[in-house]
Image: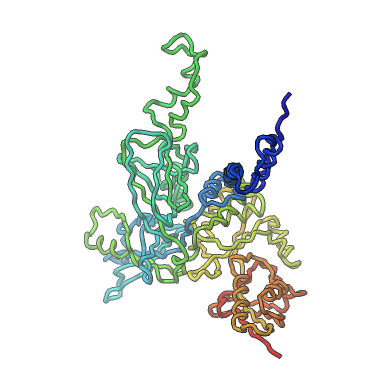
Amino acid sequence: MANVPDIKYYDKDFSTLKQDLINYAKTYFQNSYMDFSPSAPGNMFMEMAAYVGDVLSFYTDTQLQETLLLYAQERKNIIALAYALGYRPKVTTASSVTLDTYQLLPANAISPYNPLWQYVLRVESNASIKSSSNPSTTFITQNSIDFSISSSFDPTEVTVYQYDGSGKPLFYLLKKQVEAISGQIQTATFTFGNPEQFPTVTINDQNIIEVLQITDSDDNTWYEVPYLAQDTVFDESLNLPPNEPNYYQENNAARFLLRLKKVQRRFTTRFDDDNNLILEFGSGVTSMADETIIPNPDNVGLGLVDGISKMNMAYDPSNFMYTNEYGIAPQNTTLTVQYLVGGGITANLPSNDINLNNTVNTVINSYNLNSNLVIVVRDSIRFNNPNPSSGGGPGETTEQIRLQALANFPTQNRNVTKADYLVRALSMPAKFGYISKAYVTQDYLVANDVDKQNFINSNPLAISIYILSNDINDKITTASNVVKQNLKTYLSYNKMMSDAVNIKDAYYINVKVNFDISILPAYNSQDILTNCISILKNYFDITKWQINQPIIYSDIYNLIGTVKGVQSVIKVDLTNAAGGNYSTYSYDLKSATKQGVIYPSLDPMIFEVRYPDIDIYGKIVTY
């Protein structure tokens, strides 16, 4: 029986493969070939074989690596794996704001000069308002505004705006509030011919926040779903008698009705590695009803036209791919896609800055009304932001997408643990605002002994989420009320019924760093000082800090000591900066320092070096 060659399968690099080929030739072809010098022709062939083996090993390892989210390096693969795990990456984050909306309303010319409510307007959603300081930045309203409706959660304030010479009211001023996000509405069209399964189109644009609407040539609406197998979407409608005769009396408590609607025209979206948006549609390409090609009790074994029974008939299991189970595919039509682009840090604007009407569509029943007054009323619509907009931020980096997807997957779209709530809060979709820092705890665990009894008497198991956002300068700030409301709504979808969740502001404490060092001879003092400040800037980079993270003096000493040319770190001193452009909160750093560690307060907070260029200062001490 012939000897079986001893072949090694675990060698991968060029050198090892070449040496194994040489050993193999010496073992099994010792009488056929004996010249193994570098210049020998046989050496060339063995090196070429080793080269091919090395390259194949590299690509085999790389392909395996790119299938694992934890180790993948290429952005397109990380994005694809994130979608596979149910996480949707963000390419931008919209800024949120609450806008005051105003309308003039004429007064009755007859005493008691009440408002003429027949002149009230309804402002359609997606109204566009520009910034006065930066007209290229626009905000889009998220809901319609109906001045005729006033309730506890959506009040209409009425004040006298103008009197005539005799003191009689001429016009009243109506005021309501509406939520808006930064962005501009763009439009793209796509033409489809003969049907094909799962067609895709790409919107080649940047900073896309969301798709607002898709309609086809026949005015049919297409609906976005998380995955094509989901055939129902949420549908909201006004709480009016034609829509709901049983509950319309309660429209002050619920202005809109929320229902599930089954739809065939649906699509999914995903971003590619160039941040372009890909739209994918369904697979239904037949005009026949689903029941005629999917076996069911109505058409199997009941004596159809082909014979007495079809129980023994073989059915093609791929037939479902041609039905509407995954939605229908567009065919012989043109789709018009409206989508929102924008966001970013520059969309965080100061107060009283978002007030220029760009595109505002109003509705009024003008029948039997004074046409001149109708024009005045339509032209009177105005917007303003009494508080700064906040939440705007950049898209996620490749590493952030990896970490968010890994953290998001175990939750399975459920909020159970503190980590689940933390990931869910930081994963809030871009259109709702930007949460830069979040911390989840039970207030009972951070309360002092005096307050603990109060928690026991109320709800000691309630979860509190402390959050912070970013301002226009990318500095830490408290989140606006609209961001909190958006977060509350977002969390409620995946919150367990028995959970109680409170959303609160975390505190941020600004500190300044002052250090003294001595340097070795023959080193440039200015260069060493600059390097020390630079390394501290990187250490205190706010993106690397979390709520309730302490400051450890020894880390700072060691960090400065690693700078080449530093002989010794003589002193490091941290002081609190409060008031003015800094945080309004002060903190006793000295009392909070124990054994070289500055601890945060019981109330969740974060330390921030707000202006590193001026808040980090050092000097060289000579003796």
> Is residue 255 in view from this perspective?
yes
Q: In this view, does 340 lie above or below 560?
A: above
Residue 173 in which image quadrant: bottom left
Q: Give the residue at x 70% y 39%.
A: 26
Quick check: 12 left or right of 310?
right
> Is residue 57 in view from this perspective?
no
Quarter the C terminus occupies: bottom right
Picture coordinates of residue 406, whole percent (x, y): 61, 50
Q: In this view, does 166 lie above or below 327?
A: below
Q: Give the residue at x 31% y 70%.
A: 169
94, 160: nearer the viewer? 94
User: Which residue is farthest bottom?
Assistant: 623
Residue 558 in which image quadrant: bottom right
Q: In this view, does 484 lie above or below 287?
A: below
Picture coordinates of residue 291, whole percent (x, y): 44, 24
Picture coordinates of residue 449, whole percent (x, y): 76, 66
User: Which residue is farthest right?
Assistant: 595
